[in-house]
């Protein structure tokens, strides 16, 4: 493994988890194509491997926090990730986007307690990451802390659907009531927690490549006493067996996987908003992993440009989208707040997508926000 000896697992892994490992008491949303009475499905409830909701949240945050901190340690130390190329610059972003890479070997994963049994062919995980620091302001080519909270903590799935051109479907399939739950992890008190299963559908070109769907369980949490939050997405490797699955049961789609950790915070040194997103992904199908890996860094960097070209239009500013290949009318979220004091209460939709070949531009708007 490149850099730190810390290895994620057994929860935040690209190979994902089973629906039988989801916490109990999750409430499902009936799909538009409900299963027939002859089909056998499971919602995972009552499974012996299922943790309590608080234990699940604690495990996910315990793994994710030190892993993503290695990109830009709060201690001020050097990054534990390998720098990948020169920073990317975009017309709609004041901030350059720095890219990083880390490989977690399959042999290291085999040693993680709680992982599935040793596998002679377990693949290495190649993680890519981007980091950018944005002036905390509601002006062109940047965004405020309140806008980041509104777009990515409170309306993550909707925001991604809004500024990502290739998203052609998004739905929340399950959610858990995390009200009243807070956890102590790595010396921090994490609260305002949401847990949900999201299904996203992505258009893939060229044909005959099939469109993709990415079912994930997502945990989002705020660090009490700080302007900081985390969003973690974990693949569900058998969500097609859930009665609440819709896209995962669609035979016209290829079920793909991504896992990601996103940390957004206000830097105490200068008040800028630091935006870090680390991801590993596998689009499935016939596209070789090495070819996917060539495309991921540029795709995740482009997310910054897409968001910063979209958010001004949510303020009513007349800002053109980058090289439009968009389809249909632009979407928008509920009006973004002008300051963090105006941020709305949280909702349980949180989604992130790593991207493979998806990003080009967006003219979407949401009323009333992820790759091959």
Image (cartoon, grey):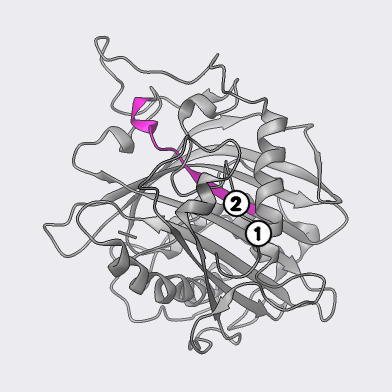
On the image, the x and y values in percent for residue 22 come to 55, 29
Spot the residue most to the left.
208
Magenta extent: 231-241
- x%, y% of residue 242? 39, 25
Asked which secondary structure carries label 1, the reply is helix
**Residue pictured at 67% horizontal, 25% vertical:** 52
Cβ–Cβ under 8 Å for marks 2 and 1? yes
Position of residue 222 in the picture relative to residue 96 (left or right): right
Residue 298 lies in what quarter of the image? Answer: bottom left
Q: Quadrant of residue 113?
A: top right
Front-lying residue, 236 or 289: 289
In this view, the residue in front, 210 or 62, is 62
Extreme residue in the top direction: 37
Residue closest to the eye, 184 or 311:
184
Residue 289 vs 216, above or below: the answer is below
* Residue 133 against residue 260 in the figure, above or below: below
Read off the residue under disc 1: 67
Q: Which mark is residue 270?
A: none
Q: Secondary structure at mark 2?
A: loop
Residue in the image at 82% along x and 71% along y: 75
- Of residue 208 and residue 58, the one placed in the foreground of this image is 58
Quadrant occupied by the N terminus: bottom right
Within 10 Å of disc 2 (Cα), the crowding (few <14, some 14-19, many 20+) is some
Q: Which residue is mark 2?
A: 8
Residue 237, magenta (yes or no):
yes
Say left or right for 255 vs 75: left
The C terminus lies in which quarter of the figure? bottom left
């Amino acid at each position: 493994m490149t850099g730190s000896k810390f290895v994620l697992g057994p929860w935040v892994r690209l190979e994902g988890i089973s629906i039988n490992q989801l916490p109990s008491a999750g409430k499902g949303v009936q799909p538009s194509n409900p299963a027939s009475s002859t089909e056998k499905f499971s919602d995972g409830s009552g499974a012996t491997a299922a943790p309590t909701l608080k234990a699940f949240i604690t495990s996910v945050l315990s793994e994710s926090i030190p892993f993503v901190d290695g990109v830009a340690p709060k201690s001020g130390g050097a990054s534990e990730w390998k720098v990948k190329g020169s920073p990317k610059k975009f017309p709609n972003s004041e901030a350059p986007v720095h890219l990083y890479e880390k490989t977690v070997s399959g042999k290291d994963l085999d040693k993680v307690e709680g992982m599935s049994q040793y596998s002679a062919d377990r693949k290495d995980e190649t993680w890519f990451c981007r980091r950018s620091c944005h002036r905390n302001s509601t002006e062109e080519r940047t965004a405020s802390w309140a806008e980041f909270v509104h777009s990515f903590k409170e309306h993550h799935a909707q925001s991604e659907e809004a500024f990502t051109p290739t998203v052609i479907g998004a739905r929340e399939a399950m959610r858990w009531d995390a009200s009243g739950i807070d956890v102590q992890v790595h010396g921090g008190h994490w609260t305002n927690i949401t847990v949900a299963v999201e299904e996203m559908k992505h258009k893939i070109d060229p044909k005959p490549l099939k469109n993709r769907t990415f079912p994930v369980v997502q945990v989002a949490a705020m660090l009490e006493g700080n302007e900081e939050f985390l969003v973690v997405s974990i693949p569900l490797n058998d969500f097609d067996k859930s009665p609440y699955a819709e896209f995962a049961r669609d035979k016209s789609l290829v079920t793909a996987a991504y896992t990601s950790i996103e940390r957004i915070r206000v830097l105490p040194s200068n008040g800028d908003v630091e935006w870090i997103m680390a991801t590993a992904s596998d689009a499935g199908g016939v596209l070789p992993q090495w070819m996917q890996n060539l495309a991921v860094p540029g795709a995740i960097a482009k997310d910054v440009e897409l968001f910063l070209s979209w958010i001004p239009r949510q303020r009513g500013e007349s800002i053109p989208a980058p090289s439009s290949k968009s389809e249909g009318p632009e979407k928008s979220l509920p009006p973004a707040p002008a300051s963090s004091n105006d941020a709305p209460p949280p909702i349980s939709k949180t989604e992130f997508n790593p991207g493979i070949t998806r990003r080009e531009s967006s003219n979407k708007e949401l009323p009333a926000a992820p790759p091959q």
